[in-house]
Image: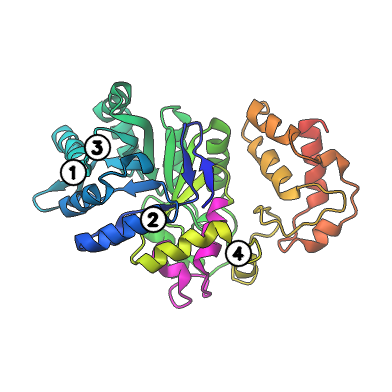
Amino acid sequence: MKYRQLGNTDMKVSEVALGCEGMIGAPPQFVDALVKTALDSGMNFLDNFCAEPDVRDNLGVSLKGHRQDMYIQGHIGSCWHNGQYLRSREMLHVKSAFEDLLTRLGTDYLDVGMIHYVDNDPDYENVFSGWLIDYVLELKKLGRIRYTGLSSHNPITALRAVKTGLIDVLLFSVNPCYDLQPPREDFEEVWKPENYQTALTWDPVREELYRTCEARGVGMVVMKAFGGGDLLDAEWSPFGVAMQPEHCLHYALTRPAAACVVGGFRSVEEVLVAARYSDISDEQRDYVPFLSNVPHSYKGKCIYCGHCAPCSVGINIAMVNKLHDLTRTQETVPASVRDHYRLLDHHAGECIACGQCEDNCPFDVSIIEKMNQAMKVFGY
C-alpha cells in the first residue's frame, strides 16, 4: 500500500481506504472481517457516514485496540431519529449524534469531522451562516475533531466551501462519468442514462474545484469512484463498457488534490482487489482504453494519463500540465506549485517540439502549445 499526504493535514493516508456502505445491515462478524482485512492490507483511513447504531457499535468493537492504526473520518449531521437515518441541521439532533458516534466507536476524538453532505445553496447558507459551522470549529478548537471536512456531490457548493478557508478536507464524488456532467443540485440526475446520450465534454467547474483544492492544500477524499458499482458493469454503466476497480481508482487518484479513495466494500474479496491497486503496474490500471472509445469527448483536454510518454528529452509532460493547470485560477503562481515544478528533472522550456508526444496522445491535446504556455508561466 502506498500513502499520500492529505492536503495540509499531518495525515499520510492510504491510497485506498475503507468506507462503511457495505456494513449497513451486516452482522458483526462481517464488519470485523472487513475492518481486519483493511488493516492487514495497509488501509489506515476510515470514512463513517452511517448513523445506524449497529454499524457504529460493530465498528467500535472491530477498532478496539486499533485506534492508533486508523484515521477516522466521521460525519456531523448524520443522525438516527425515530429508528431511521436523518440528515439534520437541528442542534439537538446533531450534537447528540456526534456524542453517540464517539461513544459507540470507543474514541474521544475524530481525525476529520465531516459536515454531512451539503449539495445546494440553501443548505450551504444554513450551514455556513448559522450555528453549525461555529459548532464544528469549536469542536476543532477543543481537540474533539482534529480537522474540519465537508462532503458534497455538487462542485459549485463544494467550491464555495473550499474558498471559505474553513475546510481542511473535502469528501467529493469523482469518476469519469461525473466529470462530464454539469453541476446539479439533484445528485440522482448525474447518473441518468439519457444525460450521456449526446457528446459531452469535461465539466470546467469540477476542474476548477480540483485545482483550487490542490492550490489551497485542501485534501480530497474521493467517494463514488465506482459509481456505486455501476461503472464495473457494462449493462449499468452510462458508457456501456465495464471498467475494472483499478481503472476507477487510478482515474480518481490522478485528479489534483486526490489523496485517497474510500470504497463501500461488500466483501472481503472486494477489499483485497482494491488494496492491490498500489502494487500493480501503470499498464494494468490504465483507464484510457475505456475512455477513448465511448460516446463523450475529452478531446483537447489533458487528463494526466501519461500516454504522451516517453518524451524525447525526458519531460514529465503530464506533471508539467498538471502543475500548469493549478496556476490557472491563481493571480500568482503558488509557491508550493513553483517548488514542485522546480524539482522536476526536466522543464517545459526544454521541449524541442518534435511532436512525438502529440502522436501518442489519445485525446489530441496540443502538447507543444501547452509546453509553451507552461514555459511562459514558470519562466523556463
The numbered mark, 3 or 4, whose residue comes first in the sequence reads 3
Q: Would you name the residue on which mark 2 appears?
A: 38
SS class, disc 2: helix
Q: Would you name the residue on which mark 4 appears?
A: 287
Q: Indicate yes or no whether the magenta region holds residue 247.
A: yes
Residue at x 53%, y 63% (from the top left corner): 246
Residue at x 20%, y 59% (from the top left corner): 28
Q: Is residue 40 visible?
A: yes
Mark 3 residue type: Thr
Compared to residue 280, the image places residue 45 above or below, namely above
Mark 4 residue type: Tyr
Q: Is residue 343 shown left or right of residue 118?
A: right
Q: Indicate yes or no whether the magenta region holds residue 317.
A: no
Q: Would you name the residue on which mark 1 appears?
A: 104
The numbered mark, 2 or 3, whose residue comes first in the sequence reads 2
- Measure how far apart labels 2 and 3 are at the Cα level: 19 Å
Considering depth in this image, is 50 or 328 the residue closer to the camera? 50
The numbered mark, 1 or 2, whose residue comes first in the sequence reads 2
Q: Is residue 57 shown left or right of residue 7?
A: left
For this orientation, the residue located farthest to the front is 65
Q: Position of residue 106 (x, y in %)?
A: 21, 40
- Give yes or no for contact between labels 1 and 2 (Cβ–Cβ under 8 Å): no
The numbered mark, 1 or 4, whose residue comes first in the sequence reads 1
For this orientation, the residue located farthest to the bottom is 235
Q: Within the image, what quadrant is residue 54 found in?
A: bottom left
Mark 2 residue type: Ala
The boundaries of the magenta stretch are: 227-253
Q: Dot 2 surroundings within 10 Å: few (below 14), some, or many (20 or more)?
A: many
- Measure how far apart labels 1 and 4 are at the Cα level: 40 Å
